[in-house]
Amino acid sequence: MLDVSHVTKRYGKNLALDDVSFHLAPGDVTILLGPNGAGKSTIMKSIIGFLKYEGEITVAGRPNKSVEARRILGYIPEMPALYPNLTVGEHMEFLARAYKLTDYKERIDQLLDRFELTEHRKKFGDELSKGMQQKLNLCLGLLPDPDVLMLDEPMIGLDPHAIKELKTMMEEMRAAGKTLLVSTHIIDSVDMLWDETLILMHGKLVANVMKNDLDAQGKTLEEFFFDVTEGVSAEAMSAGAETQENEEPEAPKKRGFGGLFRRR
C-alpha cells in the first residue's frame, strides 16, 4: 500500500534521511521509533509531500504527490495547526468541504462525541486547552477516513479516555484494512498495538521487526528498541574513536605533547 524506496533528504550538509526504504501492507499498524533527530518526522513529511527528497514514494502504486494518492493519504501532525477564529465545529466543516466529502455530518458528530468535544463545539481554536487542541487535531485527521494514515506522536497531551479511544479506533482501522504508520516516543503506549516496527537512527533505518518474530524471542518492544539503539550507539562511538586514533596521533607531536595521545 505504501512504498518508500531509497529516500534521501539533505538539509545543506546535514543528511536527515540516508537511503531509507520500507513497505507497509494494508491492514498493518507500523510503529516508527527512534531518538530525537533520528528522522521520524522528516520521513513522514516526505511521504505526505511537504518536503523535497531523492528517491521514490508511492501510495497504492501512485506517486505520493499525485491527486490520486493524496485522496487516500492522511497525516496527523505532532503539533496541531488550528485557526484561532474558527470554532471546533467550523474546523470540521471546513475540512469536510475542502475534501469534498458527502454525508459527513454524522461522522463529525461521532468523532466529536468519541473524543469528548461535543460540548466544546462552539469554542474557538485559541480557546481550547492543549489537550483539546490535540483531540481536535485527531478528529480532523480522521474525518476523511483515509486508506493510509500517518500519526506523529498522537498520544502526547491526551487524557486517558482519549488515549483509549484512539487505540480503539486504530484497531477498527486495522480491521477495516487501513494502513497505519505511527511515530512515537512512548513505547509502552503502543506495545500491544502493532504489527511491524521500524527503528531510525541518524537518518538510517537500522532495524525492521515483526511483532510475531519478537514475541517468539520472548522480548518486549522496549527491550528490542534499547538493544538496537544502544548497540548502534556503541558501534558509532567505537568507529569515532578509531577514526580519531587513526587521524590525530601526529598532531600532538607538533605541539610538544610527546606521546600523550598514544597512551590512550
Image: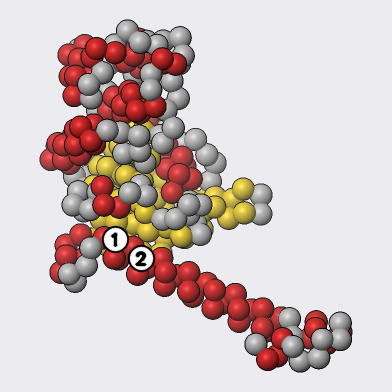
Q: Viewer-proximal residue, 58 or 39? A: 39
Q: Is residue 65 above or below residue 181?
A: above
Instruction: Tell me which amino acid carries mark 1.
Output: Glu
Q: CA distance from mark 1 to mark 2?
A: 6 Å
Q: Viewer-proximal residue, 4 or 87? A: 87
The residue indicated by pointer 2 is 226
Looking at the image, which residue is at 61% across and 81% down? 242
Element type at marker 1? helix
**Residue 69's x, y, as percent?**
35, 34
Q: Quadrant of the C terminus?
A: bottom right
Q: Is residue 51 above or below residue 195?
A: above
Q: Is residue 28 above or below residue 85?
A: below
Can residue 173 be seen? no
**Residue 63's x, y, as percent?**
40, 39
Q: Is the residue marked by circle 1 packed among few (<14), some (14-19), or many (20+) residues within 10 Å?
A: few
**Residue 200's x, y, as percent?**
42, 57
Can residue 114 be seen? yes
Q: Are dots 1 and 2 in contact, CB under 8 Å?
A: yes
Q: Viewer-proximal residue, 160 or 36? A: 160
Q: How many marks?
A: 2
Q: Quadrant of the N terminus?
A: top left
Instruction: Tell me which amino acid carries mark 2.
Output: Phe
Element type at marker 2? helix
Q: Is the residue marked by circle 2 packed among few (<14), some (14-19), or many (20+) residues within 10 Å?
A: few
**Residue 157's x, y, as percent?**
35, 34
Q: Viewer-proximal residue, 39 or 17? A: 39
Tag of residue 222: 1
Looking at the image, which residue is at 19% across and 19% down? 113
Whether residue 131 sits left or right of residue 192 in the image: it is right
Residue 78 occupies which quadrant of the picture? top left
